């Protein structure tokens, strides 16, 4: 075997190592998004009223520690206006969700930074990849700051976080996840002949699914999911009264719960229609077997996601169903990104 072939083989091995590491990071971030949803749905996000990036890793170890934390919580509006009279045991329950959410965030930082340094100093990162990894690192660090910025918005007179900050926090998490997944796919797959005519359609679907997730963040941030527990009608009509009634009208899309839930539903209908059209075109095209399997996965996830969304409404936002609906959207985006990346390769573009 020539020296050039040996070097190429080692470089490919390094690419695979980095890809598997990135996929592991993405899997943990997927779990983080799920835990974040549960934390929100159980109203646990404001139970930790301090942000200690280093010392915050240490849990309360004694009854005195718990009492001190509970006393601090009592000084803020959520306890005073919503949870007055809460027992210490009940506080422990909501505290642990937020604590685990923060600890998992730190864990993600560790499993990203340490392997990155190893790959960097052993010169295993190919040219052009290091800037992408540094951007991931910066986005991850910013996510921690954004999370605390979100929590601070609920430690004031109104004991609820800003829907804008919550949506930004969720959107950034999904952006990091998608960026990592896309980069890992680029390290795993080589360009293969595909039907390139579906490229823009696939990219548009991925973009719309991401916007749909942001729409879901607004629903969560305003508790708009509780407003109408009926489907397919909202109350007694498809188009509810008071839609876009705020002044200016555009503000209703972000602050009026009727409009926010209506928009989320319409987003869903549009995506369902477009995915069905895309799948029909894709399955008729000359695509590789893995891409066609991904299209069937996309359809299956779409059915699951629609079912979860309707169930979330009809059963008045049960925590397990609503949390599954949130990560179901991320799973749907994952399938869409895989398809988009495969078609991206087919046009001869770089990784």
Image (spheres, rainbow, N blue to C red):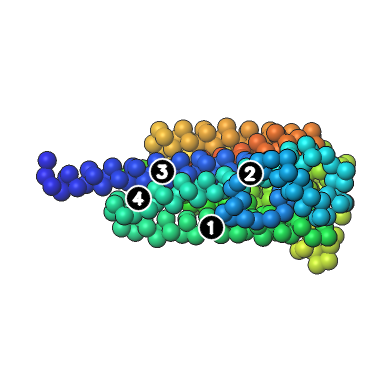
Tell me the CA gap for discs 3 and 4: 12 Å
The image shows residue 214 at horizontal and vertical percentages of 65, 52
Q: Nearer the viewer, mark 1 or mark 3?
A: 1
Element on which disc 3 rests: helix
Which one is earlier in the sequence, the residue at label 1 or at label 2? 2
Q: Where does residue 118 sit, x and y in percent of width and height?
A: 35, 50
Other residues around mark 1 within 10 Å, as few (<14) / some (14–19) / many (≥20): some
Q: Nearer the viewer, mark 3 or mark 2?
A: 2
> Which circle's residue, 4 or 2, is located before the other in the chain?
2
61 displayed left or right of 46? left
Residue 141, numbered circle? 1
Q: Find residue 59 and name its label.
A: 2
Residue 122 seen in render: yes
Q: Residue at x 54, y 37 (%)?
A: 298
Residue with the mark numbered 4 = 118
Q: Residue 22 is drawn in which quadrant? A: top left
Closer to the camera in the image, 220 or 257: 220
Q: Closer to us: mark 4 or mark 2?
A: 2
Residue position for label 3: 21
State left or right for residue 329 relative to residue 255: left
In 3D space, how far apart are the residues under numbered discs 1 and 3 (Cα atoms)?
18 Å
């Amino acid at each position: 075997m020539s020296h050039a072939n040996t070097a190429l083989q080692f470089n490919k091995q390094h690419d695979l190592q980095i890809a598997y590491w990135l996929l592991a990071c993405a899997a943990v971030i997927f779990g983080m998004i799920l835990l974040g949803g549960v934390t929100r749905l159980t109203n646990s996000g404001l139970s930790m009223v301090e942000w200690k990036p280093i010392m915050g890793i240490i849990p309360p170890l004694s009854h005195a520690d718990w009492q001190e934390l509970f006393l601090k919580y009592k000084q803020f509006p959520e306890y005073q206006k919503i949870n007055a009279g809460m027992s210490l045991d009940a506080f422990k329950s909501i505290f642990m969700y937020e604590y685990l959410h923060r600890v998992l965030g730190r864990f993600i930082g560790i499993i990203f930074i340490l392997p990155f340094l190893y790959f960097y100093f052993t010169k295993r990162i190919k040219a052009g990849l290091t800037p992408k990894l540094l951007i991931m690192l910066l986005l991850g660090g910013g996510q921690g700051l954004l999370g605390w910025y979100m929590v601070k918005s609920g430690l004031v007179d109104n004991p609820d976080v800003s829907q804008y900050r919550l949506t930004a926090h969720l959107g950034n998490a999904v952006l990091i996840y998608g960026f990592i997944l896309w980069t890992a796919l680029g390290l795993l797959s080589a360009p293969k002949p595909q039907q390139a005519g579906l490229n823009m359609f696939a990219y548009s679907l991925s973009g719309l699914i991401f916007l749909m997730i942001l729409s879901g963040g607004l629903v969560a941030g305003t508790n708009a999911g509780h407003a109408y527990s009926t489907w397919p009608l909202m109350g007694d009509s498809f188009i509810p009264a008071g839609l876009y009634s705020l002044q200016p009208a555009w503000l209703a899309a972000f602050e009026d719960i009727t409009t926010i839930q209506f928009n989320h539903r319409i987003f869903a209908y549009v995506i369902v229609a477009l995915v069905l059209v895309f799948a029909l075109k894709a399955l008729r095209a000359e695509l590789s077997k893995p891409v066609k399997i991904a299209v069937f996965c996309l359809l299956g996830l779409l059915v699951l996601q629609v079912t979860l969304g309707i169930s979330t409404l009809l059963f008045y936002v049960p925590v397990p169903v609503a949390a599954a609906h949130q990560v179901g959207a991320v799973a749907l985006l994952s399938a869409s990104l895989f398809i988009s990346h495969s078609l991206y390769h087919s046009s001869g573009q770089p990784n």
